[in-house]
Image (cartoon, rainbow, N blue to C red):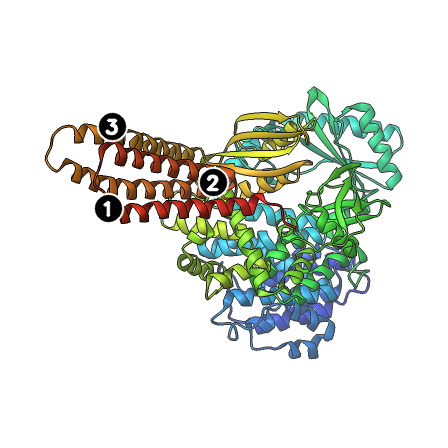
Amino acid sequence: MAYILNDIKAIIEKVKSRIPGFDSNRFLKAYHFADNAHKGQMRYEGTPYITHLIETVKILSNLRVDENTLIAAVLHDVSEDTSYSINDIQKEFGEHVAFLVNGVTKLSKVYYKNAMEKRQIESLKKLLLHTSKDPRVIFIKLADRLHNMRTLHFVRPDKQTRIAKETLEVYIPISNLMGIQGIKYELEDLCFKHLYQKEYRAFIDRLKKYNKKHDDIAQKTITEMSAILDKKKINAKVYLRPKSIFHIFKKIKSFDDPGAKNVLDLITIRIITDTPDDCYKALGVAHSMYKPDAGKLKDYIAVPKINGYQSIHTIVLGPKEARIEFQIRTQKMHDDSELGINLVTTKSMPAKYLKWMEQILELEKQDSDDDYFMRDLKEEIFSDRITVFNQNGEPFYLPAGSSVIDFIYATEPKKISYAYEARINDIIMPLTTMLNSNDKIKILITHTAHEPRLEWLPYTKTSSARGRIKEIFKSKTRAEKTSIGKKLLQSAFNIAGLGFIEDMKFKKLQKVLKERLNADYNSAYDFYVAVGEGTISPFDVIQLIYLERSSHGRDADVIDNSIPFSKKTIKLEITGKDRPGFVMDVTDVIRQYNVNLLSIWGAGDRSFGRKASLIIDFEMKDLRMFTEIIKRLEQIPGCVKITRKFAGQMGLFVTFAILNIIGWALHPFIVGIFVESGFSNAKTIVGVSIYVGLFVIFALSFYLKKLMEKNFPGTRKGSIGFALTLFVVSFVAAMTYAEFYFYKIPLDPMVIGILIALIIFYMLANYIEHRKVQLPKN
């Protein structure tokens, strides 16, 4: 235990130099209290439990934390893993320390013994609630998690995966939001090491080669910059920034990515100055010495990130044409970035962090289950942020991927009932348009009020936008919700090529909904209502259907977290207003998703309306990406309609149709040969064959129409389906009459009458359906 006491002494000496009036006796009292409480307990790596607590304190001692934070860190597992309670801690060390310890203490295992996953989520909610009141809570938790990640290789593999995944999804985003980049980068690299072991080893080897290759260039640049800055009397430290392994890996995503070399070739050098003015002077020096890369200058000093991060980033072409990124900041900016809040001088949550903490509290108050809470937390709070501006130049921070709809709900929600388009950077765009950082937005409104559309939900990123839209549709009648749900679901089925929703095997889907979403619907109509009020997304249903198919090994493969979708060629017809740049806008969307565009064909209609029609073929292996592409294509200015074409089904349809027509066209000739052959009872046999033929041809015609409607949605309620039915049944009737008249076939008039009546009824029904669509509504 001597080495632990040495660590304690080193911590005290280090902290005393930074925290005036640090009470070392109180800290030692906390250490002895924790040591006694955890006596006999061992860590999974085989060391006394107290070592974990001291390592947690050592991590915090490198940050700007106060005395109570360090004491709470020593005691942070006492109430969870020993017989001592929070009250015991409060009696010995005061209410502030007790509050901090309580914040990082998980909820009782006994209470949640049959629902450990729920315990994790409820404990996270508790942690965030305490953090909103005192930021020191999250500092202790992050230090605790960092040491656990450093020793993660000692636990069993399944636990390694669970803890690393939770760290990646929850604690890394929190450390980023709190501005503790030092902890964030180490956690990222440790997650990479445990979740992607094979890729990690390969990437480390590759990175070493690049570092060796660039060392000379980096040192030459540092020497040159230091000399010029010194000559210009700008006090600055210039050094090579260590590469974050996982940060680079995320940018590359795959070793075959053509952009991988550019990312690895980027040398990052930091310049730390005394004042913001010196930062801009250093930027001028960098741009005068080396050629700047146009469009690669980011001024986060003038416009800080949502987590308060400040720095100037610029990329230049340095010695030997090497790509060099300079990160220029003051010492204070650097400390704020690496170490987070200064907890020695700050006891409450600084204003720059209050916004996202308020959003977390708002999520916690919403009446939603744990799955939706975690989804909203990841998508809205923990995702990357963008900065956008209203027409007056005021900045607003939104999750990356937010649309104009999210912007309206975040800024002026009353406008949503009157908004019809947006002017983004002086270009008219739909409300569903995805926003980018630094976009300037003006909402265009009409005087006529309208309610939001449920179809907007897939384009929303924020829980406030989703919640308000759902609230409107939940208030509608059951009949209205059923109608809306069926319409939206059928539209999604059309895109995915799943045919009619009426043909859906609901019993199977019911089981999958229960297993995967814990959603229990008693009937298909209950399910339609859920879709119609926004409780479940139509595309979520499509994804579940493909997941269900993949579980039976059919027509699917799974890629990372993507949705199963067999690799196939997708054919889309995109109809829109004929305008310059329409084709380029379409191909840009396809290019952004890095999919293989096989062919593109287009035609313009210069008559009234000037319409353009494009048919594109591309390879797709991920349903989630496919739905994203559809959403992005719909946002193209002037896009009117997107229809999926099914080349394989078209071939099947044409084959059946040709065989049908050829078979019945040849039938009279075959009958004639058979009758004239002199075979006894030939006419009777021919008569029976005609009955059978009529039934077969009628059934085949009916099947052809159903096949066409299922796979070519545009024909369901239009003249094509009606015209096809009219042609086939008329042709069959004409051929039947010809055989009856010319060959005097003995047929039962009643049977023939029934068959003809069926044909007429079928034609009439299709004609009525056709007229319903063609006639304008009053």
Q: Circle 3 is placed at which residue position?
A: 669
> In the rendered structure, which amino acid carries the disc numbered 1?
Asp
Task: Name the spot of residue 61 as percent of width and height, x first.
Answer: 70, 57
* Label 1 Cα neighbours within 10 Å, binned few <14 / some 14-19 / many ≥20: few
Please state which amino acid type lies under the numbered disc 3: Phe
Mark 3 vs mark 1: give the one in front.
Answer: 1
**Residue 463: x, y in percent?**
67, 57
The residue nearer to you, when weighing 633 against 503, is: 503
Image mark for residue 352: none
Picture layout, residue 637 above or below residue 53: above
Outermost residue on the top side: it is: 320
SS assignment at label 3: helix
Residue drawn at (73%, 24%) of the image: 318
- Which three-letter amino acid code belongs to the residue tagged 2? Phe
Residue 618 lies left or right of residue 175; in this view the side is left
Name the foreground residue: 102 vs 67. Answer: 102
Which residue carries the number 2 mark?
722
Q: Decide: is 286 above or below 704.
A: above
Assign the N terminus to one quadrant of the image: bottom right
Q: Distance between the residues labelled 3 and 2?
A: 29 Å
Q: Which residue is drawn at 84% across and 33% down?
A: 282
Question: Viewer-nearest of labels 2 and 1?
Answer: 1
Residue 336 visible: no
Is residue 660 visible in the rendered image? The answer is yes
Q: Which of marks 3 and 2 is nearer the N terminus?
A: 3
Label 2: element kind: helix
Which residue is tagged 1?
A: 748
- Residue 298 is situated, as x and y percent measured from the top left of the image, at 77, 36
Give the spatial CA distance, label 2 vs label 1: 30 Å
Mark toward the viewer: 3 or 2: 3
